[in-house]
Image (spheres, helix red, strand yellow):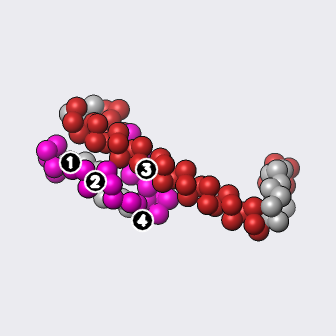
Amino acid sequence: MVKVPSAQPESENDVGESAVEAPPHSYEIALAELEVLIRQMEDGSLNLEASMTAYRRGVSLVAYCRLQLEKAEQQVRVLEGEMLKPLETNDLSSGV
């Protein structure tokens, strides 16, 4: 499990633009941070300004994750000779 520093600022006034712009170190960290932000926004623990900052950070994290997934898909395409093959569920259930 990836441990992510809390996205909750020490005080709501500590939320800054640098938090919105700092790139995550990996897809997994970005996803974990996004989950924390979503929880905070859903439970209403952030004031309006902090919510807007969290939303902007979330948009940034989603874009980062999407880019990482596109890169991974491109690598798979190269490995598969530009031909993505559909995953056959029969192979998964039979343990093959």
- Furthest residue toward bottom: 79
Q: Quadrant of residue 91?
A: bottom right
Q: Which mark is residue 25?
A: 4
CB atoms of marks 3 and 2 within 8 Å? no
Which amino acid lies under the numbered mark 1 shown in the image of this protein?
Answer: Val
Secondary element at tag 4: loop
Q: Position of residue 80 (x, y in %)?
A: 80, 64
Q: Quadrant of residue 45?
A: top left
Which amino acid lies under the numbered mark 2 shown in the image of this protein?
Answer: Ala
Residue occupied by mark 1: 15
Q: Which mark is residue 19?
A: 2
- Graded by Cα atoms within 10 Å as few (under 14), some (14 to 19) or many (20 or more), the crowding at tag 4 reads few
Task: Please tell me which residue is depicted at 83% across the width and 54% down the height of the picture.
Answer: 85
- Left or right of 63? Residue 48 is left
The numbered mark, 3 or 2, whose residue comes first in the sequence reads: 2
The numbered mark, 3 or 1, whose residue comes first in the sequence reads: 1
Residues 51 and 44: in front is 51
Range shown magenta: 10-38
Secondary element at tag 2: helix
Secondary element at tag 3: helix
Measured Cα–Cα span from mark 1 to mark 4: 20 Å
Residue 63 seen in render? yes
CB atoms of marks 1 and 2 within 8 Å? yes
